[in-house]
Image (cartoon, helix red, strand yellow):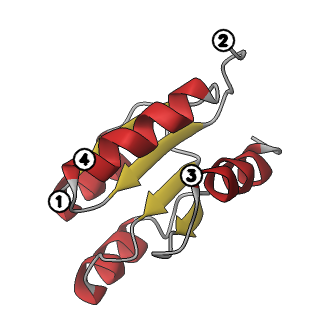
Amino acid sequence: MPERSPCRILTYGQDIFLLNTRKMVLEKGGFECNATCSAEEVVECITASERAYDIFILCHSIPFHEQELILKASEGCHVKLYVLTHLTDPFEFIERVRELAADC
């Protein structure tokens, strides 16, 4: 198993199956990852977490008003945001996350 990255990742989407799949892919890639299906939970994770998240991954299907809520909550954080498209394949996904995590 790969060595764990110091980066903390929070992934957010509406499909629990896809979230769990992405979480597994990230954990196999050596990342610490949490997943959620609720914008309120994302905001809670941002504001209440003892150790801040480094990367937020948002599914392309997240409604615009929820994206705005998350962006506003993360304004004071030094967090990288990655919005997935419906065409993002698993290899592209993990490579992009590795690029974002390179300077954690």
Q: Are marks 4 and 3 in contact (CB under 8 Å)?
A: no
Residue type at mark 2: give it.
Answer: Met
**Front residue of 100 and 48:** 100
For residue 1, the mark is 2
Q: In x, y percent, where is residue 43?
A: 28, 58
For residue 17, the mark is 4
Query: Which of labels 1 and 2 is toward the front?
Result: 2
**Front residue of 34 and 103:** 34
- Point 42% across, 38% down: residue: 23
Please tell me which of labels 4 and 1 falls first in the chain.
Answer: 4
Q: CA distance from mark 4 to mark 1?
A: 20 Å
Please tell me which of labels 4 and 3 falls first in the chain.
Answer: 4
Bin the neighbour count of mark 4 within 10 Å (Cα to Cα): few under 14, some 14-19, many 20 and up.
Answer: few
Q: In x, y percent, where is residue 31?
A: 59, 30
For residue 40, the mark is 1
For this orientation, the residue located farthest to the top is: 1
Give the residue number, with chain letter if any, for mark 3. 55
The quarter of the picture where residue 74 lies is bottom left
Please tell me which of labels 3 and 1 falls first in the chain.
Answer: 1
Residue type at mark 1: give it.
Answer: Glu
Q: In x, y percent, where is residue 51?
A: 48, 32
Please tell me which of labels 4 and 2 falls first in the chain.
Answer: 2
Residue type at mark 4: give it.
Answer: Phe
For residue 92, the mark is none
Bin the neighbour count of mark 2 within 10 Å (Cα to Cα): few under 14, some 14-19, many 20 and up.
Answer: few
